[in-house]
Image (tube, rainbow, N blue to C red):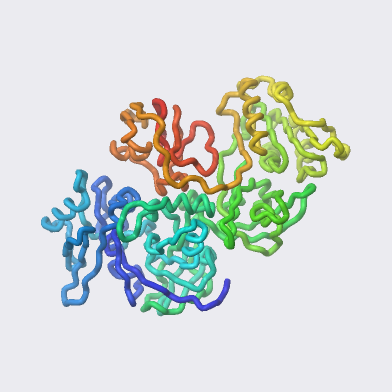
């Protein structure tokens, strides 16, 4: 990483969680961070507050993700006297004095009356509580750090000026290249007179959609990040290792290894960890087939080498807002392999094929649903072009499982020479007695290379003849969109149930709409959340998550923008996504934070 001059550009403290904060010219970083930072929260009373001095989850407090109006409030510490106080400022200019900050405020009737009037004017509960610790969204954090070059890169990609304060960091630094902070987890930093250990990047929720001074949502920031960069992260979490003073203008030095356990992060929070962008190392690169390249990647989180057959990863460029999905075509010796075909000068796949051994590339994943390879039912794997990569992974899995099920591989290619890793398919054929391979070549002049093949493309009748008893068969399809559309329609017409047709279309990221579409129907519809929890949904109820929350039904959600996948739920019935999922969801799945019903519905939010 570059050792160019990096400095602290600004320091911020947020005395009350979710409210605007204050600029500091200097402070002291203690073992727990900046004194009084996020020391207070405004409790909703919908979840219990942990005993004084213990961390409480953000879900127990009013937050910007559900209350964007809070962005118009602010809170500062008035410590210019012998008796410091907390001052909360209403958007109208009204001021509420609370203090001193070390005093318990939960029993102050006058203060709590104003808090209820300000923060629960239409009902519900709002109570100011002092936690005795810092109320970060992550219990282990002492502070957050944001790279201003990254904020500028985000603004340039979106074509707008992005105020760094919407990310509510404690420390803003400048002098690193954009996204270089993704190299920092696992490193110790000299921050002024203090030392801090960086342990994870920060995943952004809809709180960053709120204007940092006047409140209200002015851009869907998590979705803007996801569709543009392929992830919703900006900034890093850190813990203070050695306390010390910190001033604006202090140097920021990148030191040696920190006390950090990537494996623990991956095991304790696997959903979060797989979404984290991190620099993988290219440990091998080689051509395979005509026009394809395979790369083997070493993941610092050790997650990609656990990818199940059929799952995919993402690669992300730092110098351009470009990202791509690639199936993990093999896992060997702790390395994940991707097999890529692209134009030599292309910004996505072309760029990936130019990577060489020793290069570093940001990755996320693994992602995606997988087939149950242990079933005994017939399996048909349909692919075209580079879409053979899930087939390669699943054949490996079937060989390792020693399956005896009938498997038909149907692949369409221009020529036999263009099929990547043909040798692996031949080895699988030798190992699996029930495997049949059907190769279709579209180039009428191509040499079949001694391999049994047919000319042209498969037709509906070809697929029907392979299925035998279609009711129990599994069908997996990967290839260009036209191929996927035809094969899916033919499989359904042949009698394969919708839930047994699994599709993996080629996906080219594109900036989609950032504002939600209206629900197409007014309702009413009945939503059954299980265990006797039912409600009647109308257009005013909002998303499946919002409807559940209003009824007091526990939910799992984070970004509220259809990005992170935390709210992904099993549904029986029809839904409409007001924000289109970044990737196609299997039948019977929905992102509850952006889904609304268009029929009566059963929902499993777990």
Task: Kindly indicate the quadrant of the structure image that contains residue 593.
Answer: top left
The percent coordinates of residue 473 (x first, y second) are 63, 25
The residue lying toward the viewer, choosing from 491 and 404, is 491
Residue appearing at x 35%, y 50% in the figure: 65
Whether residue 24 is visible here, answered yes or no, is yes
Residue appearing at x 62%, y 20% in the figure: 495
In the rendered image, the residue lying farthest to the front is 159
Q: Is residue 404 left or right of residue 313?
A: right
Task: Kindly indicate the quadrant of the structure image that contains residue 334.
Answer: bottom right
Residue appearing at x 54%, y 69% in the figure: 177
The residue lying toward the viewer, choosing from 176 and 331, is 176
The percent coordinates of residue 209 (x first, y second) are 39, 53
Whether residue 308 is visible here, answered yes or no, is no
The residue lying toward the viewer, choosing from 189 and 13, is 13
Residue appearing at x 36%, y 32% in the figure: 529
- Relative to 9, say whether 231 is above or below: above
Q: Quadrant of the C terminus?
A: top left
- Relative to 550, say whether 344 is above or below: below
Q: Quadrant of the N terminus?
A: bottom right
The percent coordinates of residue 422 (x first, y second) are 78, 43
Numbered marks: total: 0
- Relative to 13, say whether 397 is above or below: above
Task: Kindly indicate the quadrant of the structure image that contains residue 79.
Answer: bottom left
The percent coordinates of residue 298 (x first, y second) are 63, 58
In the rendered image, the residue lying farthest to the left is 110
């Amino acid at each position: 990483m570059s050792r160019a001059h990096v400095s602290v550009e600004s320091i911020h403290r947020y005395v009350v969680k979710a409210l605007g904060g204050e600029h500091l010219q200097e402070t002291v970083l203690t073992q727990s961070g900046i004194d009084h930072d996020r020391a207070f929260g405004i409790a909703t009373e919908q979840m219990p507050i942990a005993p004084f001095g213990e961390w409480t989850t953000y879900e127990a407090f009013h937050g910007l993700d559900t209350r964007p109006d809070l962005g118009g409030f602010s809170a500062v510490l008035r410590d210019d006297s012998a008796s410091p106080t907390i001052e909360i400022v209403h958007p109208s200019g009204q001021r509420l004095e609370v203090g001193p900050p070390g005093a318990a405020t939960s029993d102050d009737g006058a203060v709590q009356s104003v808090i209820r009037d300000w923060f629960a004017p239409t009902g519900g509960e709002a109570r100011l509580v002092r936690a005795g610790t810092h109320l970060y969204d992550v219990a282990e954090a002492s502070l957050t750090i944001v790279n201003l070059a990254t904020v500028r890169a985000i603004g340039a990609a979106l074509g707008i000026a992005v105020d760094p304060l919407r990310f509510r960091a404690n420390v803003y630094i400048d002098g690193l290249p954009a996204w270089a902070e993704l190299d920092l987890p696992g490193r110790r930093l000299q921050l002024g007179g203090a030392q801090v250990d960086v342990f994870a990047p920060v995943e952004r929720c809809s709180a960053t959609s709120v204007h940092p001074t006047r409140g209200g949502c002015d851009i869907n920031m998590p979705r803007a990040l996801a569709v543009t960069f392929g992830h919703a992260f900006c900034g890093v979490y850190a813990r203070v290792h050695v306390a010390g003073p910190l001033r604006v203008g202090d140097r920021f030095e990148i030191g040696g290894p920190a006390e950090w356990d990537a494996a623990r992060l991956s095991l304790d929070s696997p959903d979060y960890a797989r979404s984290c962008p991190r620099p993988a190392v290219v440990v091998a690169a080689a051509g395979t087939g005509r026009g394809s390249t395979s790369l083997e990647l070493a993941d610092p989180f050790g997650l990609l080498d656990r990818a199940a057959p059929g799952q995919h990863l993402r690669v992300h460029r730092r110098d351009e807002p470009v990202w791509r999905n690639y199936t993990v075509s093999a896992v060997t010796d702790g390395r994940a392999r991707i097999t890529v075909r692209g134009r030599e000068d292309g910004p996505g796949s072309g760029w990936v094929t130019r990577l060489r051994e020793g290069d570093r590339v940001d990755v996320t994943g693994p992602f995606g649903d997988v087939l149950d390879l242990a079933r005994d039912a017939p399996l048909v794997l349909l692919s075209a072009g580079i879409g053979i990569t899930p087939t390669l992974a699943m054949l490996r899995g079937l060989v390792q499982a020693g399956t005896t099920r009938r498997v038909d591989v149907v692949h369409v290619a221009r020529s036999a020479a263009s099929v990547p890793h043909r040798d692996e398919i031949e080895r699988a054929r030798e190992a699996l007695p029930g495997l049949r391979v059907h190769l279709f070549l579209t180039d009428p002049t191509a040499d079949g290379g001694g391999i049994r093949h047919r000319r042209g493309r498969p037709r509906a009748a070809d697929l029907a003849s392979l299925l035998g008893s279609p009711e129990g068969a599994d069908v997996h399809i990967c290839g260009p969109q036209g191929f996927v559309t035809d094969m899916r329609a033919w499989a359904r017409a042949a009698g394969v149930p919708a839930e047994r047709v699994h599709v993996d279309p080629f996906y080219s990221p594109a900036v989609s709409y950032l504002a939600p579409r209206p629900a197409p129907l007014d309702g009413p519809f009945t939503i059954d959340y299980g265990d006797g929890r039912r409600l009647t949904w109308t257009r005013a109820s909002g998303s499946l998550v919002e409807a559940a929350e209003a009824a007091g039904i526990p939910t799992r959600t984070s970004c509220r923008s259809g990005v992170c996948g935390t709210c992904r739920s099993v549904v029986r019935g029809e839904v409409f996504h007001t924000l289109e999922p970044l990737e196609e969801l299997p039948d019977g799945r929905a992102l509850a934070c952006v889904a609304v019903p268009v029929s009566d519905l059963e929902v499993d939010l777990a």
